[in-house]
Image (spheres, coloured by chain):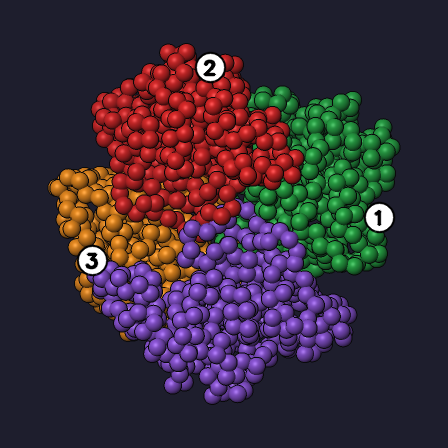
Chain colours: A red, B green, C purple, D orange
Amino acid sequence: MIKVAINGYGTIGKRVADAVAAQKDMKVIGVSKTRPNAEAFVAKQRGYPLYIADLSKKAAFEKVGLSVAGSVEDMCKAADIIVDATPGDVGATNKPLYEKLGKKALWQGGEDHEIAGFSFNSSCNYKDAIGRQFVRVVSCNTTGLCRIIHAIDNEYGVAHVHAIMVRRGSDPGEIKKGPIDAIVLDPVSVPSHHGPDVLSVLPHISIVTMAMIVPTTMMHMHAIRITTKKEVSKERVIDLVKNHPRMGLIKKSAGIRSTAELKEFAMDLGRPRSDLYENCIFEDSIYANKTDLCFFQAIHQEADVVVENIDAIRAMMGGQKDGAASIKTTNDALGFTPIQNNH
Amino acid sequence: MIKVAINGYGTIGKRVADAVAAQKDMKVIGVSKTRPNAEAFVAKQRGYPLYIADLSKKAAFEKVGLSVAGSVEDMCKAADIIVDATPGDVGATNKPLYEKLGKKALWQGGEDHEIAGFSFNSSCNYKDAIGRQFVRVVSCNTTGLCRIIHAIDNEYGVAHVHAIMVRRGSDPGEIKKGPIDAIVLDPVSVPSHHGPDVLSVLPHISIVTMAMIVPTTMMHMHAIRITTKKEVSKERVIDLVKNHPRMGLIKKSAGIRSTAELKEFAMDLGRPRSDLYENCIFEDSIYANKTDLCFFQAIHQEADVVVENIDAIRAMMGGQKDGAASIKTTNDALGFTPIQNNH
Amino acid sequence: MIKVAINGYGTIGKRVADAVAAQKDMKVIGVSKTRPNAEAFVAKQRGYPLYIADLSKKAAFEKVGLSVAGSVEDMCKAADIIVDATPGDVGATNKPLYEKLGKKALWQGGEDHEIAGFSFNSSCNYKDAIGRQFVRVVSCNTTGLCRIIHAIDNEYGVAHVHAIMVRRGSDPGEIKKGPIDAIVLDPVSVPSHHGPDVLSVLPHISIVTMAMIVPTTMMHMHAIRITTKKEVSKERVIDLVKNHPRMGLIKKSAGIRSTAELKEFAMDLGRPRSDLYENCIFEDSIYANKTDLCFFQAIHQEADVVVENIDAIRAMMGGQKDGAASIKTTNDALGFTPIQNNH
Amino acid sequence: MIKVAINGYGTIGKRVADAVAAQKDMKVIGVSKTRPNAEAFVAKQRGYPLYIADLSKKAAFEKVGLSVAGSVEDMCKAADIIVDATPGDVGATNKPLYEKLGKKALWQGGEDHEIAGFSFNSSCNYKDAIGRQFVRVVSCNTTGLCRIIHAIDNEYGVAHVHAIMVRRGSDPGEIKKGPIDAIVLDPVSVPSHHGPDVLSVLPHISIVTMAMIVPTTMMHMHAIRITTKKEVSKERVIDLVKNHPRMGLIKKSAGIRSTAELKEFAMDLGRPRSDLYENCIFEDSIYANKTDLCFFQAIHQEADVVVENIDAIRAMMGGQKDGAASIKTTNDALGFTPIQNNH
């Protein structure tokens, strides 16, 4: 039983905690919060021991009925591995603690590659993560790009990727971030950081990315053009998507043409938190003309990395050497089957 | 076992169907769709027999793997009672069918009071619905107003109500409706229709309402001022809310100050579809000064009427004469406890 | 000729600068920027001398073709009066400079009343500002409230005001602020600060305000209920609005029922920056029933205080003792006539 | 003096009317409205004679103080040429009237190419429009694509264009259209209609387009990749943009990285209606690598076609044979210089 601590119980952390709790070979030994709020009450409802960074705030937690199990350091000591899901750039400041305690740790894509020296995607480089002390799970957008690029590369060879990321401005529960009425180039310069970030997992790929932010909370949308080395077939691409454990096909028959309808479908299907762990590729958008492949894929920014974190834990702990087996274990424990099975 | 048909399997219909299915004294004998889309696949997943208005479209459903059990008329014949959850103003056109078949039917608040001659709210007039053939469950906003006004009226007597409804522009899954960047007076004229609609349930109340639409999908927000006949106490109002089976208190300790954070909390708690069946009254907003009571309440437009529909079915079928008992049965079957129990 | 410096050339500052430049008895002797950006180029286009807070950044300005006239202190020395339009709470830190130089200064509503010890509204207390060294022009929402409350109070006597402010989340050019999809109670507690702020101008009024923020950039919307001491007449209220130099009537004939259509109308009419200096009161929303008066008014957050700043300058400099005359001078110089004259 | 009638005085029509009125060789002889609303009062303010489709509504116009000059047919009879700016698909129904009267007419891009048999862009095919009876000015997105593709093609030869259009959901004044919180694929299928529409002007180009709609009102954003036949240089592309009379360069020094900041800049510069007639190409986004050219361009959906309409009128009337001269005349009359001249 792998003892997992979740440092940072927010948008990603709370999902990783539930995904860990669902696995038979892992357990949540604690989660951390900096202040008592709604999410702290959720941790209590789930029965996750609550640790806090600053013990001087213990009284503030207890006053509202939240027990505090100890400090973040106490939590890390009790764990085999720590999932650092603190906000971007905070994670780096926690590394000395993990090193001091000699613990394994994994960070999210908001941190730089250098923090761990290894960037992870279950479908691309599971084997290379086996036994590592430190791993970085790449961001939601990079995860989505790596999955499909790797699959197309295996089948056809990828000559070049041109990807435009139209990104959500904030997560649904974030009320301070905008924009309210604007399309923001983020960054203005081309390429955006996403291309280089893909190279941290798939170093041989030629890729240029462009990124913008729009006033929506639901999902990111990628408009992708891949130039392949061999002639590409729409039917074969559909099969690749259908057979991939972390990609899903949005069939034309569902009548879904937006991120909002897609999230509604996930909600109606009873997915926990309406989460979409898979790349959602729109069947009707797949355009194949000789070596030119274009398509849209929607990426749920809060969810696709969650399952990657679980596989990364398993690889780092070393008990499971086979990435495909870990992916299947993770998916099965979550009752997750890609979305095309439901329509 | 009450045999319930859901005519119109959309935003409200799909929720009522699941709520009916959860009750021990009811079952869903069918739901209707006009075209095959994502929601039709959800009905299939749930195992609800699918009926269609226009049998000439049967092939279109079957082509994508959706079995058709028959026509809407077939469905109604097989039912004891029909929940009409078709879009506003469509419901009225279905009345002749229900009359012809001699079936009980209930409509939503998008229809006029006159369609049924009786407007329903579980907490206010359950008894008056017992045995009726036709009932109209009032709209989400009117439901939210009736619950709190009735409770305050019982305790203090209500001299006058002034309520401003700041309404969501569309439901999360609706992609065609706006506004994108505007506050729309709907209507410009004062009072809005909500005041008179409250009178359809609570005819003796003095009330003026004003309504606008804003670019959000989450929930409505009501800013309410009630002038009472007796001096009002904040603590007593908090108790009234806490003890009401369909009102919930958003405590200050949760740190929630927006509809988005509230929906996130409901999602995290594992509520089905993140639904909030209860008026969500913000503890910290309750202002009581002599006979002046002000507060904010958030109303989940997709959910609060769902539980009212269940009670209305039970009242109309006549087996349960006690409204409070029906409310408890409905809530318990859904595993629903007001939100203050979770924080 | 009053020599005016604008400290902070942003949303408010750039508008005040143009309004000053339009007056015959005033001139802009300089505006200040902290960094070279699009607005700095606008200042250059207008011919306003550009001063900067930190002279070490002079090269960065000059590199892109922007001449720097000197430091902010240089600018203040050259001025008779300084309009401080720096961001909220920054203004307070500038007070020692104005005191040291013995200059007159006025701040915006983002600062506390105490900074100047006097809060200003042209229509309410012009006379009390005559000759003062320091004045605070109240915020856009408070300005809008004071104008109408004062006018109703003069005519009928105001027993009580209940006002709900539905506020825009960000200005159109602000891309970082949200919310994107939420209604945010700001604050959750009742009353909001707007009520007490009205008292800084009209100390004898009984008022309770409630405030929220919604995802729009256009304008604020106020839903107001005023209980009067004498019976109120809709026709007379319409006349009061029509005859007020800073209030406008949105007639039913224009078919306008939203902030977006209102801004579009202002744009089409050729208003500079589509600015609406006046309270925009919707004729069709005016509800008068005995001593109960309700209505909607839209407030353009970027504009309504601009004309108040001009009058405040004139009062403080002491040359014009008559508020009504100053208001007329200000309006005429801007070619401004309330919106009902155009439809 | 060319006598121009504007059939449809809405978003495009009101802008074309003002642009016509600004030209020395043209005059507005009338504009048409279907109902009295705010825009009708704007026409009155401008002094444009108002014609109406349905004369039975004349009293409704006159009741609110709007004089009616006659019917739409009367207006067309009095004109040399009609600019049809009625909503998409309505324009086609007006063609028989123009044919009956033997009048020249031009339509907007919401109509099909076949309506006129000729699709127009000033920079690409002015000469081919000379003397024609019927012309279609292509849509805002197609106009923006044609300008830049044509310029790059002239310089380097275009091998292939891949363009993603991220489109605004509604114009600022439209309050009914969404989405509020979604990214909508419009269409889901690839290519979108924009690629073929470019071919109506530039038939030899190889192009694939993908399009989506997002919740903003400001502008469209294009993310474009052009594969060229000769090696491309960033500096030379910048020069092409700077020297083009209908393209503008958003320099890095302005600090603008969003559509909202861009519209704010246009507003501050005093552009009528904050209109951006030119493609707004972000200098910092221009990426040139051998034969690979990528960049972002923002397109103001309400404005870029307005100047094209003026040139089309001039070409069709036959008095000016030189496209470049017409473009200069149009621009000069509007006082329009591309945006890089202001920063």
Q: Secondary structure at mark 2?
A: helix
Tell me the subunit letter for badge 1.
Answer: B
Instruction: Please tell me the numbered disc located at residue B154.
Output: 1
Mark 2 and mark 3 on one chain:
no
Label 2 or label 3, whichever lies nearer to me, is: 2
Q: Amino acid at mark 1?
A: Asn
Which residue is at the front of the view, D93 or D271?
D271
Is the C-beta separation of discs 3 and 1 under 8 Å? no
Numbered label attached to residue A329: 2
- In the depicted structure, whether residue D167 falls above or below residue A163: below
**Which residue: 49% across, 48% down?**
A176
Quadrant housing the C terminus of chain D: bottom left
Q: Residues within 10 Å of mark 2 (few under 14, many from 20)?
A: some
| Residue D242, disc | 3
Residue at figure coordinates x 68%, y 32% from the top left: B16
Residue found at x 27% / y 45%: A189
Q: Nearer the viewer, residue C27 or B216?
A: C27
Disc 3 marks a residue whose amino acid type is Lys
The Cα–Cα distance between marks 3 and 1, rounded to whole angstroms, is: 73 Å
Is residue D331 in sight in this rendering?
no
- Which quadrant is home to the N terminus of chain D? bottom left
